Image (spheres, rainbow, N blue to C red):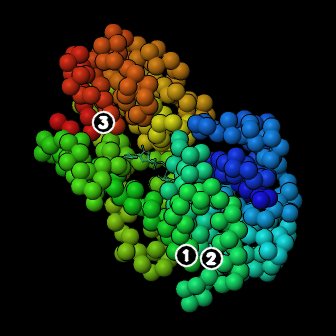
Amino acid sequence: MRMSVIGCGYLGAVHAAAMASIGHDVVGIDTDEAKVCALAAGTAPFFEPGLSEILQTGVAGHNLRFTTDIRAAAGSDVHFVSVGTPQQAGGYAADLTYVDAAMDGLLPHLRPGDVVAGKSTVPVGTAAGLARRVRDTGATLAWNPEFLREGWAVKDTIDPDRIVVGVETVDGSPTEHGARAIEQLRDAYRPAVEKQTPFLVTDYATAELVKVAANAFLATKISFINAMAEISEATGADVTLLADAIGHDGRIGRRFLGAGIGFGGGCLPKDIRAFAARAEELGRSESVAFLREMDAINLRRRERAVQLVLEALDGSVHGKRIAVLGASFKPHSDDIRDSPALDVAVRLHGLGGQVVVTDPAALDNARRVHPHLTYIDDRDAALRDADVVVLVTEWDEYRRQMPPEHAASLVRGKVVVDGRNCLDAAAWRAAGWRYFGMGRP
Ligand code: UGA
């Protein structure tokens, strides 16, 4: 199929390359010239395992190209809209400027029979509004949310665990145009469909809600276990053992019960806020009032990590050398948007600590946003002479490939704050360290 992908950020760049890798003829379109140049040269503009390989194959095979010219969308059968929907500058709601601009640019180039597939995360009700404008061109709008995780984005796009397509419905059934759009998207995702990947057809509102409900659930799961960490701290219990024990219940499950400094990134924080803002507009703020609580619990955990560092250093970080391991919001990513790791580093710096941040992938991004912090590429150089080590992103370089005896030979003070509860506390203590976990005795 011929496809256009409008918006080549974390989502769109991967989507374009992944669609090319399964044999489609794809053009990626973005207004950022530097990004388009990099992508057109087969270079991933951000760190995402496996992306460079499929980009290069697609570009070399001439079935993947990138441009800033929206007119290149003309002639595609399916147009994926994957632009960002960040948090509004002065509020919690989503900023739809980029979605509106993408649609304004795309509409003149649509042909009757084309499918526009919205992938951006939008407030429920957005698709119904856009559908009318798309319909006027003879094309059809589908809403096709994306569930990829950064760090696993290529795999999640080519081999998703479900595909959700929202279309226009009448009395619960797709309209004729909606049914045609569904068939087009089945073709677009042929390899996954042939593998019997669940393919769920819904109305627009449900498809939009599936996305925000999934992220709200994941955020809630993390904040739930972090609330249990707070209670553990007040009682001497160990939240990691608690999570193991409740996680054995198949109805609960152990995944996303990792207590620590909480969630960040470009999705969960802004999505739960936008969801709460939209619910308020709908007169249903009480239905998701708990999301504000989840947000608050999440933000408290960053402060708790800072407190632990203060406790470990007898009340003051002033003049102390603090090795912060990690800057990205999670491992296998260079994304620092709303990163809890960097937030902890910035707070410690604000308290007068001599903060040295290291990270295998995110230092360039971190340097741009927080130029006042000190950054060191080499992990061991960052550890050298540290009075305290603060692990805030659970990269393998720290959790698996940093023996406590080796780290002990580099630092001044054998004190470690494990903001992700990912180190073997017993092994670190046995090597002479004072170990502080989150919600652990
Ligand atoms: C999230 C969702 O997991 C994806 O399904 C969704 O498609 C994506 O948002 C999106 O909306 O585009 P992502 O932002 O890549 O994906 O990151 P997650 O893996 O969900 O992690 C989010 C944050 O939660 C990270 O900061 C991570 O460190 C933290 N986390 C995760 C915990 O604190 N504890 C856990 O147990 C798990």
Which structural element holds mark 2?
Answer: strand
Q: Nearer the viewer, mark 3 or mark 1?
A: 1
Q: Position of residue 153 (x, y in %)?
A: 57, 46
* Residue assigned mark 1: 202
Q: Is residue 149 left or right of residue 101?
A: left
The residue under label 2 is 167
Q: Is residue 441 left or right of residue 139?
A: left
Report whether the residue tagged 3 is closer than 8 Å to ligand 1: no
Which residue lies at the image location 59% right of the left edge and 69% below the top edge?
165
Instruction: Name the residue type under label 1.
Output: Thr
- For image coordinates 84% across by 72% down, the residue present is 111
Q: Circles 1 and 2: CB distance less than 8 Å?
A: yes
Crowding around mark 1 (Cα neighbors within 10 Å: few <14, some 14 to 19, many 20+) is many
**Residue 31 placement (x, y as % from top left):** 78, 51
Mark 3 vs 2: CB contact within 8 A: no
The picture quadrant where one finds residue 34 is top right
Residue 37 appears in the figure:
no
Query: Which residue is labeled 3 in the image?
Result: 421
Q: Alpha carbon of mark 3 to alpha carbon of mark 2: how far?
A: 43 Å
Label 3 is placed on what type of residue? Asn
Tag 2 or tag 1, which sits nearer the N-term? 2
* Alpha-carbon span between mark 3 and mark 1: 39 Å
